[in-house]
């Protein structure tokens, strides 16, 4: 089955009771048993719920995995991955990381005795230099947020296989429409399904997808034992979102390209970060591991300062000033004061998140309206 069919049918079966085409929202906490243990595969909804199961099967299908797990948020999904580890274990992570992931690693899990190394991941040798006998996990985000840095997933998979450590990839920005990390050798794909997977800015959700049965069983155990699951209503909404993922992503990519090029030619813009530009760092890797460049763009204005950047985002009218990304509507954000405010300034500036950086999540509106909006705000 090809991707555009998988988004609609992958892992799905028609409802056995009435043949409903969409899985019903099983708004129930528990399931009747005929005799103790005599149930039809569902006992309690923290452990299993048919609507969540339908979503998890869809997620596994679109990521070319075998097992999907849905959580109450992206961070809850990451939390479950780190709970595979024990005190003394070490993680090598991308340094230009989603702020909330950085906060979870440093403010929660460091206190539990897990050590994190935050590095640029420019190449495999750099990463291999940090591997020691305690290393258990390599955590990759690509494209990174908000600098759109590209990390070579295949090269990271080679390091992880050689040293027998797990490789997890946060695939939130690319989505499986553009990038399938399991095919490139990753062990775990993670999503903030809040973003492109849901796609309509109406839910908070996380996901993990794996191929290996043993790893899946460990994660299902953590999902049930820690209990950070999502509810059936949100599972239904995410499943509905996935059914249009391919056409939404196609338009996000088209609009993203037009806006990136518009900004690059604008006399008041200093720099535009978008992986589709030939002079973008690791553009060749982006080209080989992605099927398109997406709708996320960051830029800085010429001679720009904090106040100017704030003024631009305040003056946008079609773009909404808001955290988050990946919805049908265009959003603009100011990472230094919003999504990345929890990262200390010296760390933040080191990775390029200057005070003047603006991040766009380009939506699927008419691109002429989006460009006109940027034009008036920048002027
Ligand atoms: C939003 C986001 C997360 C966190 O997901 P939540 O659903 O907000 O918990 C993690 N990684 C990336 C890249 C994100 O954009």
Image (tube, helix red, strand yellow):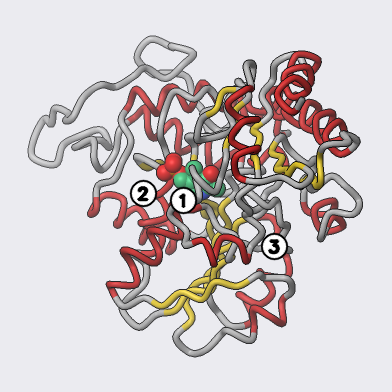
Q: Secondary structure beneath disc 2? A: helix
The CB of the residue at mark 2 lies under 8 Å from ligand 1 = yes
Determine the residue positioned at 84% across, 54% down.
280
Categorize mark 1 by other alpha carbons within 10 Å: few (<14), some (14-19), many (20+): some
Q: Position of residue 175 (x, y in %)?
A: 63, 41
- Left/right of residue 25 with respect to residue 2 in the rendered view: left
> Where does label 3 land, which residue?
153
Give the alpha-carbon distance from disc 1 to disc 3, as whole Å.
28 Å
Determine the residue positioned at 37% across, 33% down.
52
Determine the residue positioned at 64% across, 33% down.
361
> Where does label 2 land, which residue?
76
Give the alpha-carbon distance from disc 2 to disc 3, as whole Å.
23 Å
Q: Is residue 138 above or below residue 31?
A: below
Q: Secondary structure beneath disc 1? A: loop
Q: In which image quadrant can residue 35 be found?
A: top left
Of all residues shown, which one is farthest toward the left? 36
> Where does label 1 land, which residue?
341
Q: Position of residue 6 (x, y in %)?
A: 64, 31
Q: Nearer the viewer, residue 57 or 315?
A: 315
Q: Where is residue 28 in the image (x, y as percent from the top left)?
A: 21, 24
Which one is closest to the eye, mark 2 or mark 1?
A: 1
- Earlier-in-chain disc, 2 versus 3: 2
């Amino acid at each position: 089955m090809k991707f555009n069919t998988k988004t609609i049918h992958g892992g799905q079966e028609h409802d056995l009771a009435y043949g409903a085409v969409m899985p019903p929202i099983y708004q129930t906490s528990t399931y009747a048993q005929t005799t103790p243990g005599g149930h039809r595969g569902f006992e309690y909804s923290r452990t299993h719920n048919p609507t969540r199961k339908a979503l998890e099967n869809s997620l596994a299908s679109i990521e070319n995995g075998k097992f999907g797990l849905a959580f109450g948020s992206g961070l809850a999904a990451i939390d479950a991955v780190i709970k595979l580890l024990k005190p003394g274990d070490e993680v090598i992570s991308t340094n230009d990381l989603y702020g909330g992931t950085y906060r979870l690693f440093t403010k929660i899990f460091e206190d539990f005795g897990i050590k994190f190394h935050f590095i640029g991941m420019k190449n495999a040798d750099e990463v291999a230099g940090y591997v020691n006998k305690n290393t258990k996990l390599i955590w990759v985000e690509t494209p990174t947020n908000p600098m759109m840095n590209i990390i070579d997933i295949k090269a990271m998979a080679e390091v992880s296989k050689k040293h027998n450590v797990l490789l997890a990839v946060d695939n939130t920005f690319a989505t499986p429409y553009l990038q399938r990390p399991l095919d490139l050798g990753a062990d775990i794909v993670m999503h903030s399904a809040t973003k492109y997977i849901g796609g309509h800015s109406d839910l908070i959700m996380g996901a993990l997808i794996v191929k290996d049965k043993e790893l899946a069983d460990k994660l299902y155990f953590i999902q049930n034992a820690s209990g950070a699951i999502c509810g059936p209503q949100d599972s239904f909404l995410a499943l509905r979102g996935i059914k249009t993922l391919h056409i939404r992503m196609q338009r996000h990519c088209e609009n993203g390209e037009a806006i990136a090029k518009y900004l690059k030619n604008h006399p008041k813009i200093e720099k535009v970060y978008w992986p589709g530009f030939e002079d973008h760092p690791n553009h060749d890797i982006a080209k080989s591991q992605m099927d398109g460049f997406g709708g996320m763009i960051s830029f800085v204005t010429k001679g720009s300062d904090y106040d100017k950047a704030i003024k631009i985002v305040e003056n946008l009218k079609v773009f909404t000033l808001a955290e988050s990304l990946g919805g049908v509507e265009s959003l603009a954000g100011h990472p230094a004061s919003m999504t990345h405010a929890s990262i200390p300034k010296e760390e933040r500036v080191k990775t390029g998140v200057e005070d003047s950086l603006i991040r766009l999540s380009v939506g699927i509106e008419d691109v002429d309206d989006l460009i006109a909006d940027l034009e008036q705000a920048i002027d």
